[in-house]
């Protein structure tokens, strides 16, 4: 069974830091890209960043709103992805999801985690 | 403000057909595949359509999608009460180097 499980959310003060984790199982982690997507309260979905696999040099992309403050890393040995968030602002408050992309068939986000809530206040 | 534009709301009665539009540009919808997601309250989004018009296994054929130029649309036929949810289009933007989501459309079944 394909699973993605986020953890690490919580309450943090403005200017603070937090690291989210996304643990995956049920599929070959290194065959997929993994993205972070968030949904602020009362708003729509917003893409945060992308982590590509080893075949694509583990390259990353970030939304302009988080570039320079957030960083994605992955540990293939632990089948885990991390979102390191620094200089947090109130507008970063959101439910954060990780989701996988099968780049070979252009299938973005066929599986999502349940989300982890970040509140900056 | 989202670069992909969706109507904020749509509605229909049970059994009707409803369409939701998504307008973008040459750097996203026109050049990349469009995906559609359904998000029910309190749950994670669910993939409905990928790469313009492909349905993942398990998604009913009541859901269909198309794309033309810089616009895409999702159609829901035989509307059911359980279709009441938020719907999002998404496409990679080659200029921005990131995934763009539409602002979302709240579908109400009257």
Image (cartoon, rainbow, N blue to C red):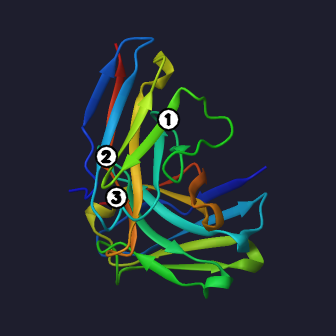
Front residue of this view, candidates A7 and B61: B61
Question: Element under label 3?
Answer: loop
Q: Is residue A112 visible?
A: no
Of marks 1 and 3, the one in the foreground: 1
Q: Are marks 3 and 2 on the same chain?
A: no
Going by the image, does B7 lie left or right of A107?
A: left
Q: Residue at x 25, y 56 (%)?
A: B2
Mark 3 to mark 2 CA distance (whole Å): 26 Å
Q: Earlier in the sequence, mark 1 or mark 2?
A: 2
Chain of the residue where label 2 is placed in the rendered structure? B
Mark pair 1, 3: CA separation: 33 Å
Query: What residue lies at 37% left-to-right and 12% top-to-bottom?
Result: B13
As drawn, the label of residue A93 is 3
**Image location of residue B24, percent across then percent down:** 28, 56
In this view, which residue lies farthest toward the bottom?
A57
Distance between the alpha carbons at the discs numbered 1 and 2: 14 Å
The subunit carrying tag 3 is A
In this rendering, position of residue A110 left or right of residue B85: right
Element on which disc 1 rests: strand
Q: Position of residue B96 (x, y in %)?
A: 32, 74
**Looking at the image, which residue is at 31% across and 40% down?**
B21
Label 1 chain ID: B
Tell me whether circle 1 and circle 2 mark residues in contact (CB < 8 Å).
no
Write down the residue under mark 2.
Answer: B22
């Amino acid at each position: 069974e394909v699973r993605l499980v986020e953890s690490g959310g919580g309450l943090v003060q403005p200017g603070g830091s937090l690291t989210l984790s996304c643990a995956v199982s049920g599929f070959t982690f290194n065959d997929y890209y993994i993205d972070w997507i968030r949904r602020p309260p009362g708003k729509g979905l917003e893409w945060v960043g992308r982590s590509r696999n080893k075949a694509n040099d583990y390259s990353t992309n970030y939304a302009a709103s988080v570039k320079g403050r957030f960083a994605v890393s992955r540990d293939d040995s632990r089948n885990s992805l991390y979102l390191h968030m620094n200089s947090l602002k109130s507008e970063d408050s959101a439910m954060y999801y990780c989701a996988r992309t099968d780049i070979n068939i252009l299938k973005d986000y066929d599986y999502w985690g349940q989300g982890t809530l970040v509140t900056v206040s | 403000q989202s670069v992909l534009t969706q109507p904020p709301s749509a509605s229909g009665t049970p059994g009707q057909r409803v369409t939701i539009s998504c307008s973008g540009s040459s750097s996203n919808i026109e050049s990349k595949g469009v995906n559609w997601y359904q998000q029910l309250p309190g749950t994670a989004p669910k993939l409905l359509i990928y790469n313009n018009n492909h349905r993942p296994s398990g998604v009913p054929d009541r859901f269909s999608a198309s794309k033309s130029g810089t616009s895409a649309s999702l159609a829901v036929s035989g509307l059911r009460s359980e279709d009441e949810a938020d719907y999002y289009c998404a496409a990679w933007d080659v200029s921005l180097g990131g995934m763009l989501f539409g602002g979302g459309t709240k579908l109400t079944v009257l």
